[in-house]
Image (cartoon, rainbow, N blue to C red):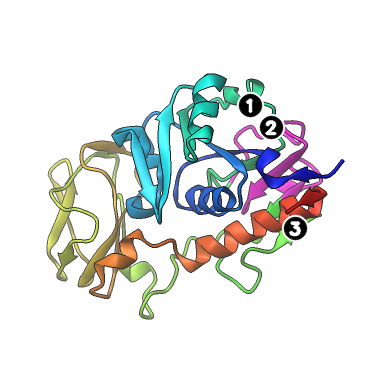
């Protein structure tokens, strides 16, 4: 029997930038999308991450609203009826036992499989390295910023993660600050603020963190969050357009397109 897009339920693990780009694309394509998150998300590109709803209750990205709810099916379906995306705090992804999934997308970007199984849904999709199509997931979508970005892999795994940020104005690692140690990150800055090179942007404990270049704060960890060593804290784009902080990146749109392709490859859908 041919089914309509609006009849399909997609559960996405994660509320970060990749997961949010996927959720946005699938929601606009009329799928019923639900996001799961951890108690204290560590998103940096907070202008375009639905995980902000964990702290603020709601988050709107390019006209699409996510709302924080409990994992009860009644609340999830209520948000869907209102035309929005439900997001639940559910590190164990127990909600998959409460709603009848068609698709599960692991977009936690952990660079390893943290428990997703090929039996979790009729279609299970892994994002990037750490997953193997035909083994722990049905399909893998490439997330490396290469010629294969957004490609759907039906057998095997994705490219190894390079750890190199997307180049903006010819700069990659030079525009990013990673946590030099674990601790509480504090800042009085906001997403979209302008900074100049060597300006103090934030600190971990009493250790100040200087802007490596001048530009706009495209990414910034929330003030007061405990962070582990090595996590991305600050991302600066060497431009002066604040609006870019709230627009989904081309990379995320390409990845989301790969997920949509994977779903259409699997199911006979009446669009």
Contact between marks 1 and 3 (CB within 8 A): the answer is no
**In which image quadrant can residue 3 be found?**
top right
Q: Earlier in the sequence, mark 2 or mark 1?
A: 1
Contact between marks 2 and 1 (CB within 8 A): the answer is yes
In-front residue for pair 59/124? 59
Question: Disc 2 vs disc 3: which is toward the camera?
Answer: 2
Q: Compared to 181, does 213 lie above or below?
A: below
Q: Which mark is residue 101?
A: 2
Residue 214, visible in the rendered structure? yes
Asked which secondary structure carries label 3, the reply is strand
Q: Residue at x 76, y 36 (%)?
A: 118
Q: Which residues are magenta?
A: 112-139
Q: Residue at x 63, y 20 (%)?
A: 98
Q: Which residue is mark 3?
A: 153
Q: Compared to 231, does 200 lie above or below?
A: below
In-front residue for pair 30/141? 30
Quadrant (top left/top right/bottom left/bottom right) for the C terminus: bottom right
**In which image quadrant can residue 194 be found?**
bottom left
Quadrant (top left/top right/bottom left/bottom right) for the N terminus: top right
Asked which secondary structure carries label 2, the reply is loop
Where residue 152 sits: x, y (%)? 72, 59
Q: Which residue is mark 1?
A: 96
Q: Neighbour class for label 1 at 10 Å: few (<14), some, many (≥20)?
A: some
Where residue 150 sits: x, y (%)? 63, 63
Does residue 136 show up magenta in the picture? Answer: yes
Q: Neighbour class for label 2 at 10 Å: few (<14), some, many (≥20)?
A: many
**In which image quadrant can residue 119 be found?**
top right
Residue 143, visible in the rendered structure? no
Q: Residue at x 58, y 24 (%)?
A: 95
């Amino acid at each position: 029997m041919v089914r309509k897009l609006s009849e399909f339920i997609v559960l996405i693990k994660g509320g970060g930038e990749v997961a949010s780009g996927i959720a946005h694309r699938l929601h606009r394509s009329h799928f019923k999308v639900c996001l799961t998150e951890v108690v204290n998300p560590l998103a940096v590109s907070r202008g375009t991450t639905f995980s902000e709803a964990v702290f603020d209750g709601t988050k709107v990205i390019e006209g699409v609203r996510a709302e924080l709810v409990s994992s009860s099916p009644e609340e999830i379906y209520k948000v869907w009826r209102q035309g929005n995306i439900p997001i639940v705090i559910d590190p164990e992804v127990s909600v998959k036992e409460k709603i009848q999934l068609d698709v599960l997308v692991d977009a936690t970007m952990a660079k390893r499989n943290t428990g997703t199984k090929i039996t979790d849904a009729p279609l299970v999709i892994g994002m990037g390295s750490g997953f193997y199509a035909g083994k722990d997931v049905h399909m893998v979508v490439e997330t490396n910023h290469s010629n294969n970005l957004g490609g759907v892999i039906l057998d095997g795994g994705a490219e190894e993660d390079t750890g190199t940020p997307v180049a903006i104005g010819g700069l990659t690692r030079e525009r990013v600050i990673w946590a030099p140690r674990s601790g509480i990150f504090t800042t009085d800055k906001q997403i979209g603020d302008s900074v100049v090179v060597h300006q103090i942007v934030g600190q971990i404990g009493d250790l100040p963190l200087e802007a490596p270049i001048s530009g706009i704060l495209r990414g910034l960890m929330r003030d007061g969050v405990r962070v582990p060593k090595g996590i991305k804290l600050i991302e600066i784009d060497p431009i002066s357009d604040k609006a870019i902080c709230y627009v989904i990146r081309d990379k995320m749109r390409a990845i989301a397109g790969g997920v949509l392709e994977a779903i259409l490859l699997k199911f006979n859908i009446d669009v």
